Image (cartoon, rainbow, N blue to C red):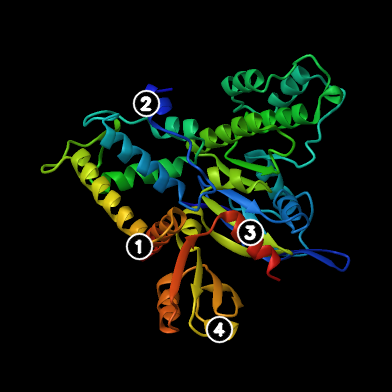
Amino acid sequence: MGVVIETVALKKTYGKHEAVRGLNLSVRAGSVCAFLGQNGAGKSSTIKMLLGMIHPTSGTGSIFGHRIDREKESLLIRQKAAFVAEDKRLYDYMSVAQIIRFTKAFFPRWNHDLERRLLEQFELPTERRIGQLSKGMRTKLALLLGFTRGCELLILDEPTEGLDPAAIEDVLQIVVSLAAEGTTVFFSSHQIAEVEQVADHVLMIDRGKLVLDAPMDQVKEQYRHIQAVFPEPVEERDFRVPGIEKVRTEGRTVSLVASHNVDSILEHVRMLRAGSIDVLPVSLKEIFLEKVKSR
Amino acid sequence: MCYICSTVFRKPNPSSGVPIYVQVKEQIRHAIETGALSPGDQLPGIRSLAETLVINPNTVIKVYRELEQEGVLEIRHGLGAFVAPRRRGQSKTEEIRDAQQMVREFVETLKEQGLGEGEIRRLVEAELAGEFQRR
């Protein structure tokens, strides 16, 4: 399968602040790729660079083979990719029906069936002015406009922020059906549970750098939490084995987080004469907290 | 939406640490063991199941492909996924019943040795997690 989004050593600095520090991303066609990170980790800056809304300080990238840092090619990107921004900015003076009519005039591949389905599902008041919509309604409308464009790539910045659980499930369901039709989805989120549910690939950034880039199943299958008790007190330096991401020792007990190589790690732990060894799965939330807090 | 989707399948728990495809595979196996699905029954289409469970379509593809390799399902190209004919020998239901008896006796033995329910559960889960890792 081809690569839809690719960046090479992508960098963005604002004055002295380095928001994005040499990002190498690659998103495959047909994937639902989640982009995780804390507030200020560099997610929105990355997305804005992908869409040509801000210019990289250095490095480059491409979407569908079009360079993101060349204005003409960036236009082609914006034709093929739908983007729903974090602030969901829309024309306040238009009504819901007006903005839908206005938007669809630009997109020949507009999905009329999906438009009808979403209007009903989201219970959007078609005659109300956008300026008078609640935050949740506004988000739903922005998503409707993005989803129905009939695009090959959907880029969503915090798509479910401010939505109630029922609406979130609706949104995720549409993401799933668009993915089934072959649309590539790239979305940033703080909601780890929803990411685990629909994404097949996870990218995690912290302070402008990639800290995790792996298929979701691999994350779940290879990350393990290992706890062991030894006859004698142990120290952190007893546990220098590839695959160990984090070590915490306390007297005769140790708690390890392993990202891979669990067999060899267990072998090592047994060699240190562990009396009891527990191997437990690790949730994406724990991995996230581990990755962003360990520095 | 197909009728099977709503009765046989439950939404997987994304945060459990067990990959979603493993959870859905277990649901299908369970449905076959309990007789909710019989040999020859058709499973939902990829898109339909992905939408019902709100999971990634590639996950459904992985589930069907692996169950086909394990001989549980048959993929007929252009038609979809079907429950494979039962293999010879002891039926799955009987196997499960026997296994249940073994587990019961095993748990009794551990309890007699003074282990609590929580301890037993933890041991079994740790063993399975380790087992899964070794595979």
Residue A153 position in % (x across, y down):
60, 42
The Cα–Cα distance between marks 4 and 1, rounded to whole angstroms, is 30 Å
Residue at 21% across, 46% down: B98
A264 versus A118 height, above or below: below
Q: Quadrant of residue B32?
A: top left
According to the picture, the residue beneath numbered tag 4 turns out to be A234
Task: Classify residue A276 as left or right of residue B25.
Answer: right
Pointer 2 with pointer 1, Cβ within 8 A = no
At mark 2, the secondary structure is helix
Residue A193: which disc? none
Residue at 77% across, 20% down: A96
Pointer 3 with pointer 1, Cβ within 8 A = no
Residue B113: which disc? 1
According to the picture, the residue beneath numbered tag 3 turns out to be A288
Tell us which disc is closer to us: 4 or 2.
Answer: 4
Query: In front: B118, or A246?
Result: B118
Residue B4: which disc? 2
Residue at 46% across, 55% down: B118
Chain where mark 4 sits: A
User: What is the crowding at mark 2: few (fewer than 14 residues within 10 Å), some, or many (at least 20)?
Assistant: some
